[in-house]
Image (cartoon, rainbow, N blue to C red):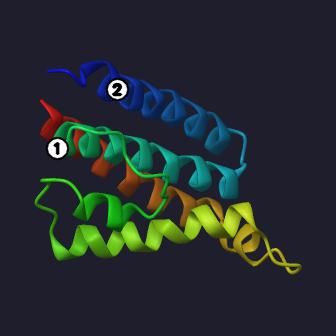
Amino acid sequence: MAYDEDINYWLNAAAHDLDVAETLFEKNKYDWCLFIAHLVLEKTLKAFYVRDNRKMPPPIHKLDILALKTNLNLSTEKLKFLKKVNEFNIEARYPDKKFSFYKLCTKEFTEKYFTEIKEIYKWLLEKMK
């Protein structure tokens, strides 16, 4: 496969980011944990984009749009979840003056979403094989 190197780049970057997200969770940096967790899924989906389209992915961050540009067969529930996770990218990157996202990211909230993000990540890795 001509694009193996690019696919491996995205998958290795996603694995690295997962380690970073785990560290952030352990350090109670919940808003940034979810921001980086978004990147885990984004980079994994970009690996699928390369695999399925034989070209580098577009410079977009919307997980649902990336997923729809691959050959993945995602359920409506998974697509809906990806749309929700998109919010973590924007909210953490551009906080409002009230720090709403920061306040939303309690340990319980973050653990719930981070757990599901890791489950989808594992599912995607299985599909990559």
Residue 79 on image: x %, y %: 27, 70
Relative to 63, say whether 4 is above or below: above
Q: Residue at x 44, y 73 (%)?
A: 84
The kind of secondary structure element at disc 1 is helix
Q: As drawn, is 95 to the left or to the right of 51? A: right
| Numbered label attached to residue 74 | none
Q: Residue at x 75, y 78 (%)?
A: 100
Q: As drawn, is 40 to the left or to the right of 64? A: right
Along the viewing direction, whichever of 5 and 33 lies nearer the viewer? 5
Relative to 45, say whether 99 is above or below: below
Residue 75 on image: x %, y %: 15, 69
Kind of residue at disc 1:
Asp
Whether residue 122 can be seen here: no
The residue singled out by tag 2 in the image is 6
Kind of residue at disc 2:
Asp
The N terminus - image quarter = top left
Q: As drawn, is 31 to the left or to the right of 49? A: right
Residue 116 appears in which quarter of the rendering?
A: bottom left
Whole-number angstrom distance, CA of label 1 to CA of label 2: 12 Å
Relative to 11, say whether 59 is above or below: below
The residue singled out by tag 1 in the image is 52
Residue 104 on image: x %, y %: 67, 74
Q: Tell me if mark 1 has few (under 14), some (14-19) or many (20+) residues whose alpha carbon lies within 10 angstroms of its own.
A: some
Along the viewing direction, whichever of 85 and 68 lies nearer the viewer? 68
Q: Residue at x 49, y 36 (%)?
A: 18
Q: Tell me if mark 2 has few (under 14), some (14-19) or many (20+) residues whose alpha carbon lies within 10 angstroms of its own.
A: some
Along the viewing direction, whichever of 8 and 16 lies nearer the viewer? 8
The kind of secondary structure element at disc 2 is helix
Whether residue 89 can be seen here: yes
Along the viewing direction, whichever of 119 and 57 lies nearer the viewer? 57
Residue 129 on image: x %, y %: 12, 29
Q: Which comes sooner in the sequence, label 1 or label 2?
A: 2
